[in-house]
Amino acid sequence: MARTINRRRFIQSAAAASLPLLLPRRALGASPNEQVTLGCIGMGNHGVGWNLAAILKIPEARVVAVCDVFTDRRESARDTVNAAYGNQDCAAIADFREVLARPDIDAVVISTPDHWHVLMSVMAARAGKDVFCEKPTLNIDQGQVLIDVMNETGVVYQGGIEDRSVDQYYRIAALARNGMLGTVRHIRVGLPSGEVFPKEDEAPVPEGFDYDLWLGPARYTPYTPTKTGAQQWRNVWDYSGGKLTDWGAHLMDTAQVAIFEEHRGPVEVDGKGVFPTDALSNTATEYEIHYRYASGVEMLVKSGGPGIRVEGDDGWIECPGWRQPLKASDPALLDAALPADNKLWPQPPTEHVDFIRAVQQRTKTTYSPTDIHHLSTAMHLGNISMRLGRKIQWDAKTQTIIGDDEATALRSCPLRAPWTFDATA
């Protein structure tokens, strides 16, 4: 029987002698000027086109292994790495546990489907690897496990979101946090609508693909050709939370940072969604979610296309699409100097550069486990509200859903045996 998340039991068992804490090679005396050696896990479109492409441009980083359950993906990624470095020594590995077992690897880059994010990060941390992992978590409870284990092991962790490094989103958050819009009252976030993929009949697993390892901790369902495609799995509850947890991780982060809520989150969530029937997809395709924060700020998250607008008593600023030029109630806001006592942290470098520097210097990153957890929680609460068709009350201090056992049950899901949060590489 698959086991559910039990954070206390996990931490107790991890502290036992049977699960020794391994320290990163860099923490054992390696020079901070050495290259960070990396294993990249998940060689799909984003793993190669965004994460690997960025890391190959960083002189302080060196990719020594790539890993994917698809033979063609890992071999293609290996060839990309070898071509970039002009050699033939990058390993192409099928099982990520082999990557975690390699003593010559300092850190891993995880670009898998969402249902692997926390478990793989936990296993990597236990193996002494620093972790760069794509967003989001799969559910609320997994986010707290992530925080606990990263804190306990002391590894460097970076969530894979770029927005705090992007000029448009940094300026939106900075203007709001520094009071240059007056008191913020309303935020509007637009996100893409979800796709509908039709059901398919069970098919033989193709040669060169380890479907059981692709499923990992997700419940078993028969193989069908579409499910494991680049975007299709994002629309299935077993593996993700739809467009809300995909695109929402970007624009909702900017929204919460703008109002000092990145480590707390909403107190009330009321969402309505349209869900496919008789289809592979089962996450919301169209949605409208109302969030209320303790400060009184109201946020509307609605499908239809990406964008964000922050409205205060003294003006507004918006990005009407993804990384589009900003618009404002007063054009002077677009170039206004931020105050000397800027209430937002300095604009960080890209998430990949930030991670490599943090690994070398043993410092905090732009997106900590706490950041990822609270951001993901806001999105998960939106999905829970939509799935139940009712308003959810959230106690941000105790991290609990108030007075709703059915909603509370959706905070987590079991892991398919033999996978557990006690697993090691």
Image (cartoon, helix red, strand yellow):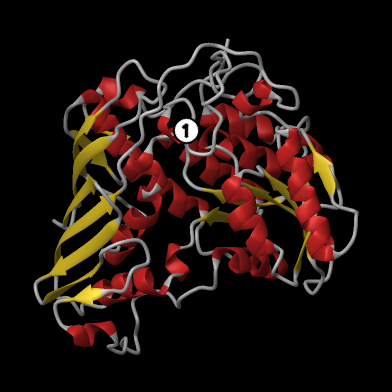
Residue corresponding to mark 1: 232
Viewer-proximal residue, 137 or 215?
A: 215
Q: Is residue 94 above or below residue 356?
A: above
310 displayed left or right of 324? left
The N terminus sits in image quarter: top right
312 displayed left or right of 31? left
Q: Is residue 327 above or below residue 385?
A: below
Badge 1 amino acid: Gln
Residue 102: give x, y in percent of width and height: 85, 45
Residue 325: give x, y in percent of width and height: 31, 74
The image quarter containing residue 187 is bottom left
181 displayed left or right of 280? left
Outermost residue toward the left? 313
The residue positioned 69% from the left and 43% from the top of the image is 124
Viewer-proximal residue, 123 or 47?
A: 47
The residue positioned 35% from the left and 37% from the top of the image is 380
The residue positioned 21% from the left and 27% from the top of the image is 403
Residue 112: give x, y in percent of width and height: 59, 40
The residue positioned 67% from the left and 65% from the top of the image is 356
Q: Is residue 72 above or below residue 298?
A: above
Outermost residue toward the right? 88
The C terminus sits in image quarter: top right
Name the secondary structure under disc 1. Answer: helix
Task: Give the class, few, some or many, for how many residues have Cα within 10 Å of label 1's Cα (few <14, many ≥20).
Answer: some
Residue 26: give x, y in percent of width and height: 79, 61
